[in-house]
Each structure stands twice: as structure tokens, then as C-alpha cells.
Amino acid sequence: MSFQRRTSEKTTELTASVPVKLLTAGSAACFADFITFPLDTAKVRLQIQGEQPVRTVALAPATINTSASLKLNPTAVPATQHVQYRGLVGTITTITRQEGFRTLYNGLSAGLQRQLCFCSIRLGLYDTVKTFYGSLLKENEAGLQIGTRVLAGLTTGGAAVMIAQPTDVVKVRFQAATRSSTGRRYASTLEAYRTIHREEGVRGLWRGAMPNVGRNAIVNVAEIVCYDVVKDCLLLYAHMPNDIRCHFSAAVVAGLAATIVASPVDVVKTRYMNSPRGQYRGAIDCAIRMGAKEGVAAFYKGFVPSFARLVSWNVVMWISYEQLKLVIFNRNQS
């Protein structure tokens, strides 16, 4: 594909109205979220595993001094962590067997609300913001414009989180709740918003906003900027046609990059959002205590389902987005 044709495609994207871009991005993201939601639930369960230790207690007879018996037998009350979930397939199987298949879609409503708010902004406004930064930085339009794209990704990713944060909090809490312990915390997403606001205030709805801003700004750069750059390289240097093969290849690279850079922040964000009020002094305290208690490996808990989910999500979202652009933008031109 020639550069002239690629330039023409960029012009077509830029002439599309902002509402059309927002709707197209949000629709593609919702479809991708629906397809990959069980993977996200498995990721959340693996990430919070280890947060609340389950102790196996060997009860001593009433006539025996418990503290004395512990000195004689230190293993009488072993603080063993019960590992309920193992691996992606094992986690999904366990959830389905113990709680039913529908549990894998707990929080789907909040997840779709999140995508409509979040992805519409971070992806739908990306080209507009990129054009704005391009005019400020005066980068060579024939080049890859890495600085412009990174700034645009950071800006739209951070802005999207500040607007869509309550939907993310509700989604995480629905996915983390198990029937075997406390059951569902909320009967519906609307009740969840009201309950969190009533019990924890406005700050509760924006719990974990700062780590989430960091996480999603990084993910936005890894996903959108990486996809944008890889797609351009495939078009310009590998002479690959602008079709599903190109979109699939760029989406896989973007998903891998996003998983690697975002996993530590994602684990902290999930733990902190799901924590009871007062358990942590903040996201940094959550990260420090988690690292001290569970080691560095804890920051990559749920890496496999996170990788599977992000790659799958990116493939479905980008292919859907590109196809929707072809349909909607071509219809607008005709």
C-alpha cells in the first residue's frame, strides 16, 4: 500500500465527526468486552487471591492454655494460604463449578458502561488529540510521530479514567464477590453506585483513581500508540494490505505490550478498589504491603489471564473498530 493511500485514509479519519468517532469506539469496545469478560473475571479473582489469608486452625481442648500449646507446637495454628484458583483454565473451571457460568459475567453491566465512557474517550478522541499535539510539536508528518502519539495516548487515557472511574470500581467489586463467602454485595449496578456513595462517599466511587490513571495512561500508550505505530509500519514498510491480517497482527503486539507494562499497576488497582474501607492508607501503602507479604511475584498475579484477555480484547476491539469505520465512514462519504 502506498503512502499516498495511507495519507488519504488518515484524512478520512480526521474528517469524521467527533460523535461518530466516540460511538464507533464505544461500540467496538463493548463488543470486545462482552466476548472477553470471563477472562477478565478470572484475572480479578487471581489478582485478589492472597489478600485475605485463610487460616487452618487446630482447636485446643478448653482445659489447655492455648498460648502455651502454641509455644510447644508452633504448627497448631498454621497460617496457610488456601489457594483456590490455579491458572486461567482452572480459575474459570472453579468459578463455573462452584458458582455457575453466569458468575463469569458478574459486573458485565458496569463493564459495558465503563467501555462506553472510557474507550469512547481514550480511542474516540485519540486522533483529534493527536492532531492537536502534532500542531504544537511540529513533528514530521511523514514520520512515525512517536512523541505526538505518546502524548495523545497519555492524555486521552488519563482523562477517560477520571470520567469512567466509578464504573470500574463497581465492575471490580462485582467480579471479586464470591458466593461462598459474603455473596453478592449488590443486587444491581445502580444499587452499587448508590450504596458506595452512601457508605463511602464520593471518594469511594473514585477509589483507586490515581493508580488507575497511571495504569490506563500506560495501557493507552501500549495499546493505541503501539497499534497505531505497528499498523503504520506494516502498511508502509512491510507493504501489507490494510485488511484484517494487518489489524490482527498490530492488535496482538499491542495486547502483549499492554500486558507487560500494566500488570503491576493493574494488580494494585484491583486490590485497592476491592479493599474494605480503611484496610489501606492508599494505593502506595497497598503496593508496599502486598510486596512485603507476597513478594514481587504478586505484582504479576493473573498475568496469563490478563495476557489472554488483553490480546483477545485488542484483537476483537480493533478488528471491530476498523470494520465499523469502513462501514460508517464510507456511508458518510456516499
Image (tube, rainbow, N blue to C red):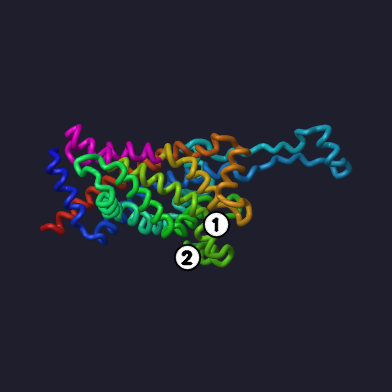
Q: Residue 190 has which mark? A: 2
Q: Nearer the viewer, mark 2 or mark 1?
A: 2
Residue 238 painted magenta: yes
Residue 142 percent coordinates (x, y): 19, 41
Asked if residue 109 lies left or right of residue 248, the reply is right
Query: Does residue 191 sit above or below 275 in this rendering?
Result: below
- Dot 2 falls on a residue whose secondary structure is helix
- Numbered label attached to residue 184: 1
**Position in image of residue 277 (x %, y %):** 61, 57
- Residue 177 visible in this rendered orientation of the protein: no
Residue at the farthest right position: 63
Place of residue 130 in the rendered image (x, y in percent of width and height, measured from the top left): 28, 50
Residue at 14 percent across and 40 percent down: it is 3
Looking at the rendering, the stretch of residues picked out in magenta corresponds to: 229-258
State the SS at label 1. Answer: loop
- Figure quadrant of residue 304: top left
Q: Is residue 184 above or below residue 74?
A: below
Measured from the top left, where is residue 181 in percent x and y? 61, 51
In the rendered structure, does residue 185 fall within the stretch colored magenta? no
